[in-house]
Image (cartoon, rainbow, N blue to C red):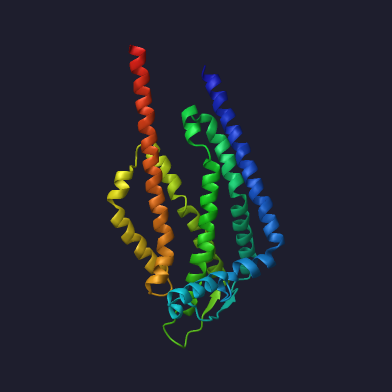
Amino acid sequence: MSEEKEMAFLDHLEELRWHVVRSVAAIFICMIIGFIFQKWIFDNIVFAPANINFPTFKWMCKFGELVGAEESLCAKPFHFKIQSRNMTGQFMMSITASFVIGLVIAFPYVFWEIWRFVKPALYKKEKNSSRGAVFAVSFLFLLGVAFGYYILSPMTIWFLSTYSISDVIVNEFDITSYVSTVVGMVLGCGLLFQFPVAVYFLTKIGMLTPQFMRKFRKHAIVVILILGAIITPSPDPFSQLLISLPIYMLFEISIFISAMVVKQKQREEEAELKADQQQQV
């Protein structure tokens, strides 16, 4: 009996190993493709948010014209130099950028491999309630990446590159600092947008309720507004709302998901109770 359990455990490890191998291989292949086209990627993706012609700045300016806040929302041209002060600086940053590109592209497949490993251990009821998990997680991750790249990155770069405590100081950023900042915001937002998924599973296991989230909604709004004020390059309310509104919508969507999960659990419990009563009769 113990040998059968041990073999089953080893079989699970072997299966997990192959899921990990395929996931790493997918990231590595996408990483190689990214490395081959690294010059195009750096010129058109990595350094793009540092250009005043980036789509986000154009959208903000057009929105400013519509609401009469053109001076606040239209970013002025900004210039700064990016240097590489280490011998291996450019090479290491090309590896880092290629890895991030590979991870973002391969993420849906990687999560699908993880889901394939976890799914057999779930009950039939749990499998039915978790349909579309791969699509939901992948969609939210890519949506978060887009938010970090098109909203947070250009606004943060604009603010940090134009911020000055003295005219004597010239902004010349190291490539390591620049790439790390962009990568951190892009991947950070990708993870932040997994909040509804986390709320779904926490509600599923009974650790979170929609009542709790509604109770602390005001606190969440304050935290989101503070976060928006910190991130926003200018202190005007339009820019702050531009950052805060998507995050707040994410919070409200999470409350809705939590409420749906609670209602589903109640229906299942009522159905089980009726089934037990019928059996007793």
Q: From this view, report whether residue 21 is shown above or below residue 121.
A: below
**Which residue is painted at 35% across and 65% down in the image?**
226
Image spot of residue 26 (x, y percent): 65, 47
Depth check, front residue: 265 or 82: 265
* Residue at figure coordinates x 37%, y 30% from the top left: 267
Whether residue 88 is visible: no
Rendered view: 267 above or below 29: above
Q: Position of residue 155 (x, y in %)?
A: 48, 71
Residue 15, percent across and down?
60, 33
Q: In the displayed orientation, state which residue is furthest to the left.
A: 215
Q: In the image, what residue occupies the spot 48% across and 65% down?
A: 152
Q: Residue furthest right?
A: 36
Which residue is found at the position 46% from the left and 79% from the top? Answer: 70
In this rendered view, identify the residue nearer to me: 50 or 13: 50
Horizontal side, residue 36 vs residue 56: left or right = right
As drawn, the residue found furthest toward the front would be: 66
Residue 57, image x and y in percent? 53, 73
Look at the image and tell me in which quarter the C terminus lies: top left
Residue 192 shown left or right of residue 120 in the figure: left
Q: Nearer the viewer, residue 212 or 91?
A: 212
Can the viewer see residue 256 in this picture?
A: yes
- Residue 224 in which image quadrant: bottom left
